[in-house]
Image: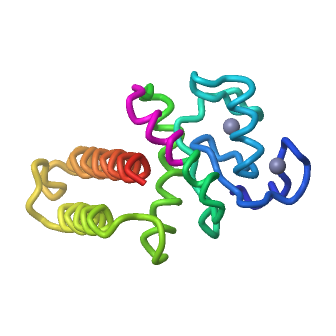
């Protein structure tokens, strides 16, 4: 959740069992789920703050403890897996989702062992490619143009990690 946002925009209180959307807005899990059920269900929920489509609900700090609420969040994320997400939205939400992924990698909860392993492997592979002198477009010969393949492979790797995370969320 954004540091400056410390109240739920729906109930205007300190969020209980907070979740964050892909568009980086934070709500109480129950508030946003009730809002979705009464307003947009069965279609995708639109964020009450920015009107963008919510295609991922991520637990913040502690995992949501109430089983029924957690199940509803999982169902929502599972439902969104079948939705095609526009590239503009993927690029915009990327940094926020990646921040959650890194938080989950550093904590013991959340990501499954298999997804965790895959993500760390891809990160190491990307890092190895970035620092290795063997490139598709070597910087030493091509100068700044030589960084295009590095930037491209970095962005592709990050986008792939987000896809892995969405699938992991959808399986929970
Ligand atoms: Zn609330
Ligand atoms: Zn929003």
- Image coordinates for residue 109, horizontal then vertical, percent: 48, 72
* Left or right: residue 119 compared with residue 2: left
Residue segment shown in magenta: 74-84
User: Which quadrant of the structure image shows residue 35?
Assistant: top right
Quadrant where the image shows the C terminus:
bottom left
**Picture colour scheme:** rainbow
Residue at 46 percent of width and 77 percent of height:
108
- Image coordinates for residue 52, horizontal then vertical, percent: 64, 28
Residue at 72 percent of width and 41 percent of height:
32
User: Which quadrant of the structure image shows residue 121?
Assistant: bottom left
Whether residue 36 is situated above or below residue 75 in the rendered picture: above
- Can the viewer see residue 110 in this picture? yes
Q: Nearer the viewer, residue 156 or 71?
A: 71
The prevailing secondary structure element of the residues shown in magenta is helix
In which quadrant of this rendering is ligand 2 seen? top right
Residue at 24 percent of width and 49 percent of height:
153
* Left or right: residue 131 compared with residue 26: left
Q: Residue furthest right?
A: 12
């Amino acid at each position: 959740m954004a540091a400056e946002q410390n109240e739920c925009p729906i109930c205007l209180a300190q969020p209980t069992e907070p979740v964050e959307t892909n568009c980086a807005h934070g709500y109480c899990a129950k508030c946003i789920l009730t809002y979705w059920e009464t307003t947009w269900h069965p279609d995708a929920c639109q964020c009450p703050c920015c009107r963008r489509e919510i295609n991922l609900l991520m637990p913040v700090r502690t995992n949501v403890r109430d089983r029924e609420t957690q199940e509803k969040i999982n169902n929502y994320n599972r439902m969104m897996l079948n939705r095609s997400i526009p590239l503009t939205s993927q690029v915009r939400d990327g940094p926020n989702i990646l921040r959650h992924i890194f938080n989950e990698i550093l904590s013991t909860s959340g990501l499954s062992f298999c997804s965790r392993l895959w993500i760390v492997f891809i990160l190491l592979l990307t890092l190895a490619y970035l620092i290795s002198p063997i490139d598709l477009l070597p910087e030493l010969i091509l100068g700044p143009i030589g960084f295009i393949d590095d930037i491209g492979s970095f962005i592709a790797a990050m986008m792939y990690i987000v896809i892995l995370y969405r699938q992991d969320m959808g399986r929970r």
